[in-house]
Image: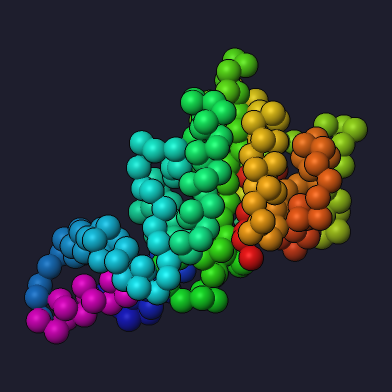
C-alpha cells in the first residue's frame, strides 16, 4: 500500500476514533519491521483485532489516569448507548463528574417510569483536552454529551428512537412554529441539516414524546453543574421552560431537533 494511502487512513481513523490511527501505525509498522508477508485482508483483520483489544481492555484504564471514564457499553442498565458504534468508535468518554450526573439523571427518569432509560449519543474521546470529536467541535473536554429525546410508539413511551445513529431524524417544526432550519439555510448555512445523511437507517412509526423529553430537560436544569443545553428553538417553545441555560447553537452549527446537547461547567 502506498504511503499516501496510509496517511489518509491514519488521519481518517484518528478523526473517527482517536486511537485508530495509532493502532494502524503499530500494526502496519510491525509488519514492515518484521518483513512479514500478509494479504491486505489478513492485515485488516489483525488491525481490527488489535483495535478491539485496545478499545475494551487497554484504553479504559489509561483514560482513567487522565481523568476520563467510559460510559456503560451495554444496554442492560439505566444509562446506555443508543448505538453500539458509539462505544466501538471510542466516542463514549466523559469526566467522572459528568458520568455521575448522567447516572443521577438516568436513575431519576427510570424511577418515574421503569420502562425508560437514558440513551446517550456522542460524548468525547478518551484523551487530550482540546481534541475535538468531529463533527462536534465542542465535544473536546469530557464535559459534553448528546442525549436522545424520548419517543412513543402507538402512544406508549419507550426507548426506541427513529434514527439508528441517533442523529438526522428530526422533530420538524409545525407551520406555526419557528423554522430555524429554513432561516439558517436561507442565510447560506447549507450544512445546518446535513445530519439527515447520518441516520444509518431510520423508522417513521415513532412520535416525539414531549412529556418525557420535558422531564429530562427539567432534571438537567435542576442540576447546578449544568452549564448549557442546546436544543432547537421550536422545541424549546414546545417544552415551554424559560431558562437562560437553554441556548440556540447558531446557524454555523447543525440543527438540534434530533437530539439535545448537554454540558456541565
Ligand atoms: Zn453536542
Give the quadrant of the C terminus: bottom right
At 28% from the left and 71% from the top, the residue drawn is 23
Q: Horizontal placement of 90 versus 176: left or right?
A: left
Does 158 appear above or below 193? above
At 51% from the left and 65% from the top, the residue drawn is 142
At 55% from the left and 76% from the top, the residue drawn is 130
Q: Is residue 156 in view?
A: yes
Principal SS element in the magenta part?
helix
Q: Horizontal placement of 17 versus 194: left or right?
A: left
* Front residue of this view, candidates 205 and 223: 223
Ligand 1's image quarter is bottom right
The quadrant holding residue 184 is bottom right
Does 129 appear above or below 118? below
State yes or no: residue 21 in magenta: no
Residue 253, percent from left and from top: 71, 60
The quadrant holding residue 109 is top right
Tell me the magenta residue range. 22-34
* Front residue of this view, candidates 32 and 157: 157
Residue 103, percent from left and from top: 48, 46
Q: Horizontal placement of 49 versus 36: left or right?
A: right
Q: Is residue 179 in view?
A: no
At 48% from the left and 55% from the top, the residue drawn is 99
Amino acid at each position: 500500500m502506498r504511503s499516501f494511502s496510509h496517511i489518509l487512513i491514519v488521519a481518517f481513523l484518528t478523526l473517527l476514533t482517536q486511537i485508530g490511527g495509532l493502532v494502524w501505525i503499530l500494526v502496519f509498522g510491525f509488519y514492515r519491521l518484521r518483513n512479514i508477508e500478509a494479504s491486505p485482508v489478513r492485515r485488516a483483520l489483525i488491525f481490527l483485532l488489535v483495535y478491539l483489544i485496545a478499545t475494551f481492555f487497554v484504553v479504559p484504564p489509561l483514560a482513567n489516569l487522565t481523568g476520563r471514564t467510559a460510559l456503560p457499553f451495554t444496554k442492560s442498565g439505566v444509562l446506555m448507548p443508543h448505538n453500539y458504534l458509539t462505544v466501538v468508535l471510542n466516542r463514549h468518554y466523559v469526566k467522572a463528574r459528568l458520568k455521575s450526573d448522567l447516572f443521577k439523571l438516568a436513575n431519576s427518569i427510570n424511577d418515574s417510569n421503569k420502562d425508560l432509560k437514558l440513551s446517550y449519543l456522542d460524548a468525547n474521546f478518551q484523551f487530550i483536552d482540546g481534541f475535538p470529536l468531529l463533527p462536534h467541535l465542542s465535544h473536546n473536554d469530557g464535559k459534553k454529551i448528546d442525549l436522545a429525546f424520548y419517543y412513543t410508539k402507538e402512544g406508549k413511551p419507550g426507548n426506541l428512537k427513529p434514527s439508528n445513529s441517533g442523529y438526522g431524524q428530526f422533530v420538524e417544526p409545525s407551520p406555526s412554529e419557528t423554522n430555524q432550519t429554513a432561516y439558517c439555510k436561507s442565510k447560506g448555512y447549507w450544512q445546518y441539516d446535513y445530519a439527515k445523511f447520518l441516520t444509518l437507517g431510520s423508522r417513521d412509526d415513532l412520535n416525539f414524546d414531549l412529556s418525557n423529553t420535558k422531564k429530562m430537560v427539567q432534571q438537567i436544569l435542576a442540576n447546578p453543574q449544568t452549564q448549557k443545553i442546546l436544543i432547537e428553538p421550536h422545541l424549546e417553545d414546545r417544552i415551554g421552560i424559560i431558562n437562560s441555560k437553554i441556548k440556540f447553537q447558531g446557524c454555523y452549527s447543525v440543527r438540534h431537533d434530533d437530539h439535545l446537547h448537554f454540558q456541565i461547567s
